[in-house]
Amino acid sequence: KTQKKMEAEAAPQTLPSQADQQDAGEVVVPPPVETTPTTATTTATTTTAGGSEPTMRAIVYESYGAPKDVLQLRTDHPRPKITGLFDVIVQVHAAAINPVDYKFVEGYMSLIQFFHFPFVPGFDFAGVIVETGTGVKGFRKGDEVMGMAHFQSCGSFAEYMCISSSCITFKPSNLSFAEAASIPLAGLTSYQALVGTSKIQAAQKVLILGGSGGTGMFGIQIAKHFKCHVATVCSSKNADFVRELGADEVIDYNTDDWGLVLTGQNYDVIYDCVGGKENYEKAPQVLKPGGYYTTIAGDQQEKFTVGKLLSIGGSMMARTVSSWVSKAPKYSFVTTATNGHELAVLANLAESGQLKTHIAERYTLEQAASMFEASMTQRTRGKLILQVVPEQQQHNNNNNNNNNNNNTEGEADI
């Protein structure tokens, strides 16, 4: 009877969807996080032959498909353990969704994914270290950190995750966990695309396609940090938003063709956060000879098949060779790599107020499917956040930690 009761309690919960509530492409606002009675520190315990093993709440999927159909909230998912000398266990307070997350779930990149089901999605996170491997230097239990998981591991849409200490940095003290979680993947993508690939320099002219999205908003600020002139393309309703981020010129894609508006203006870099073959075809009339066309989206938003991969590879090679032998744009398709050192650069910019973020909506673990659907509309301004630990609980935990530190003589402040 006990075993049957445990199995019933541990059964996966199918996550609700708000697809039929969406209207005209706008993101549906979910119920406020504060009204959800669940807390992220509650875990279940599964009895095994060797004793009790700690478990946790986590979003998982066991097959590819539409997020509303395949995502499950499990209360009995095994809590991760340290697997390497340089690993840390982080209690996740907040995580952020990126377009790559729903593409993973739907199987867009199944040909190049090698993980095993059930799988916990999520790259971005911010939280508190609760355990460290014996080889970890520079971090300790109690440190507040943010980071980005590796491509094949993910795991941030859960209460705990195991990650290499090379993938994290300290959370900026002036940001909440939710704000910090919004930065890693999108911030690193823009940093690596603009600084690493496009090699931006002061006084250069940079055009950002999709400046109001989660990646584009960081691109604007990074380019302005390097003292570039920045033009961006977005809808008119987001014009004030991108200007506040530092954009010098805003083009409304609903009324104007950026290729015509900027023809002959000799831009140094086009940073494409939108994708589409037509955008690349407009680039030569806007870029100066030998300018950079750096994209994170490519020509097509479709599932990878062998044929598609060959087509993409052939197209990329043709564009690259063309830039070598002519004055065609220097074409690059950027994939993001997690990097703790570059994350530290972004954290320092945020700490100094030079890198700001914007949270569009927050969701609980129970609302994860709705968060995925909102991300798939590609209509969000800024970032969508998975609030694993409610903010009030975070505040209470911080107060308790401060009291413990004040009452313990000789211990270093965390």
Image: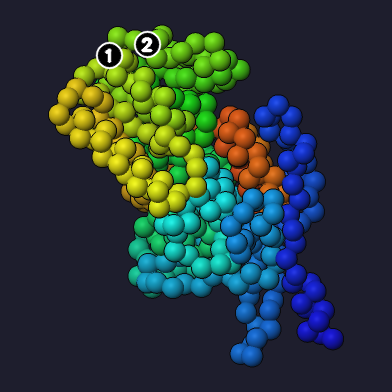
- Image height check: is 324 above or below 103? above
Image quadrant of residue 288? top left
Could you tell me residue 85's position as x and y percent?
37, 72
Query: Among all residues in the image, which is located at the extreme front?
Result: 307
Could you tell me residue 368's position as x and y percent?
67, 50
Total marks drawn?
Answer: 2
Picture residue at 53% right of the left edge, 48% below the top: 103
- Image height check: is 172 above or below 266? below
Q: Amino acid at mark 2?
A: Leu
Query: Among all residues in the image, which is located at the extreme bottom?
Result: 49
246 or 1, which lies in front?
1
How many neighbours does mark 2 have within 10 angstroms: few (below 14), some (14-19), or many (20 or more)?
Answer: some
Picture residue at 30% right of the left edge, 41% below the top: 314
Picture residue at 55% right of the left edge, 40% below the top: 179
State how the image is colored.
rainbow
How many neighbours does mark 1 have within 10 angstroms: few (below 14), some (14-19), or many (20 or more)?
Answer: some
